[in-house]
Amino acid sequence: MMPVELNPYGNPVEVGRLIISSPGLQGMAIHYDSGAADMRGAEQTTDAFEQALRNMEVVAQETVEIFDTREVDLGDVSTRSTHYDEPALIIQVPDAGDEWGQVLMYTDESGVITWNFPQDENNQVDTTRGAQTRTYVIRRYVAETPAETGSRGVIGAIGKKILKVLAFKLLDPIGGAVADYFVSRWENNKRPYRFRPFTPINYQQSVVPALDDSDWATLSSGRALLMIHGTNSRTHIAFHALPQTYVQALHNNNTYEGRVFAFDHLTLSEDPRQNIDWFFSNLPEGIHLDVDIICHSRGGLVARMLSEKQDSFSRGNRSLTINKIVFVAVPNSGTILSDAIYMGDFIDSYTNLLNFFPDNGVTESLEGIIGIAKQLAVGALGGLDGLQSMHPEGKFLKELNTSGTAGSTNYYALSSNYEPQEPGLKAYAADRLMDKIFKQDNDLVVPTAGVYCTNGSSGFPIENHIVYTAQEGIPHTGFFGQDKAQVQIMNWLAENV
């Protein structure tokens, strides 16, 4: 198809089957049909992204590439804006049909990705069925293109805008009907609970042997180290960036002497109380564990349930003593991104962390993001208890922070005030995350001070804490690949307390 010129005065322009109104934006647009030989070349999507779409039964209906963009000053002309009062593109897309849901994935010139859902005139998610078209309201700015594009973990189409219309059947063969418990069914099927070994040989592997009786006997023979991953993750994803020599050093530590293991658990659909119910129900009868814990993100709330609330669980003749917890980027005071009205921004943040900082497990992480996007697209906000457990004013966190008792457990914390250096991501983080949502220093997911500050629990504020500055450049998912963080964690674990 030949390129079509956009109308900067807002007059609708047909681009393939899409109708685009672009007030204030000049440029050219070209449409690619689903399955066209040159479509993926225009998008520059990775194999990991394409595999995640296939695994989640999502199909690309069509793609529009917008290039040679330039903003045009229209003076005081009134135009529609996004939910955040940003100048917007208005995209009308043919409805996928009564048996299908739809979402639009948008990538700007700098590689920043947002998930967009059909909206009504009040900028609320439009969940009505039977309409001939769906309307999407998308941030219009022409983002500055970084000088060094680097590698990208999802899409690498730098210097142009990409509109990618994605459709999914409302009855999914993996997760059942896309409704309040779609993510729950997917998570139980794809990411079930387990205790797993964490050795220098297998810590980066997904498929590992189950812990047997001899393993539990070893773990209970002295102090052990427990690794607890964070949101939308698994052990082999969360801690993949640790060097093998570092994991070997953890095993060689005179305190642990090889006693290191991990807890894989549901993070999206179940809250930390449910996680710990499973934890105690599946520990071997009669076992006593004495542990230190390294935890990341939401995994820190799971660790706190073990240290502050374990007396509220049925433990039988099992017992657990916790000496130290190292909290890494943990939302101990919550993250507003877990609020239902910001859930789209939550998956945007995680998608951009994957896109700008690709690491192990991109496909698995994208599957979780796509699952949440499916639910949001049809207005199904229930069944995401694991995410909403991080809500600063939510029932779970308020109860934990008003009744938690740390006892003799020693707390340590690492947090970051992260400011991206990539121009597009920097603008996105400043304009939306900082100015419109967090309104305080953050690491793109969690407020900086919320990791260690006073929150009502007896273990806070955490005096032994380190805050990495903007100049040190550590985003929410980037701690374990940093030498300084690795050294600090090891020093804390070595302290005699």
Image (tube, helix red, strand yellow):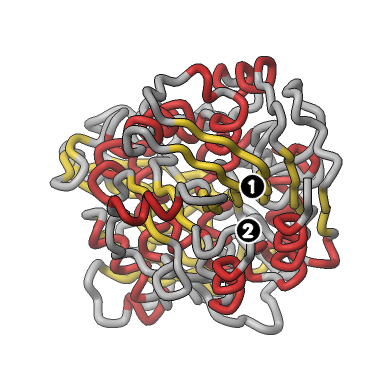
The x and y percentages for residue 333 are 70, 31
Q: Is residue 164 above or below residue 190?
A: below
**Callout count:** 2
Q: Is residue 488 above or below residue 170?
A: below
Going 60% across and 51% down the picture, which residue do you hit? 294
Q: Name the amino acid, label 2.
A: Thr
With 228 as the anchor, is 335 left or right in this view?
right
The x and y percentages for residue 367 are 35, 55
What label does residue 255 carry, if any? 2
Q: Tell me if I can see residue 288 in this picture.
A: yes
Q: Tell me if I can see residue 27 in this picture.
A: no
> Which of the two marks, 2 or 1, is nearer to us in this view?
2
- Which residue is more in the foreground, 49 or 167? 49
Q: Are marks 2 and 1 in contact (CB under 8 Å)?
A: no
The x and y percentages for residue 9 are 61, 54
Going 58% across and 70% down the picture, which residue do you hit? 252
With 410 as the anchor, is 277 left or right in this view?
left
Q: Is residue 369 above or below residue 240?
A: above
Mark closest to the chain's N terminus, 2 or 1: 2
Q: Residue 335 occupies which quadrant of the picture?
A: top right
Which quadrant of the figure contains the N terminus? bottom left
- Which residue is more in the foreground, 215 or 278? 215
Circle 1 packing at 10 Å, graded few (<14), some (14-19), many (20+), is many
Q: Is residue 193 above or below residue 459?
A: below
What label does residue 445 carry, if any? 1
- Which residue is more in the foreground, 251 or 11? 251
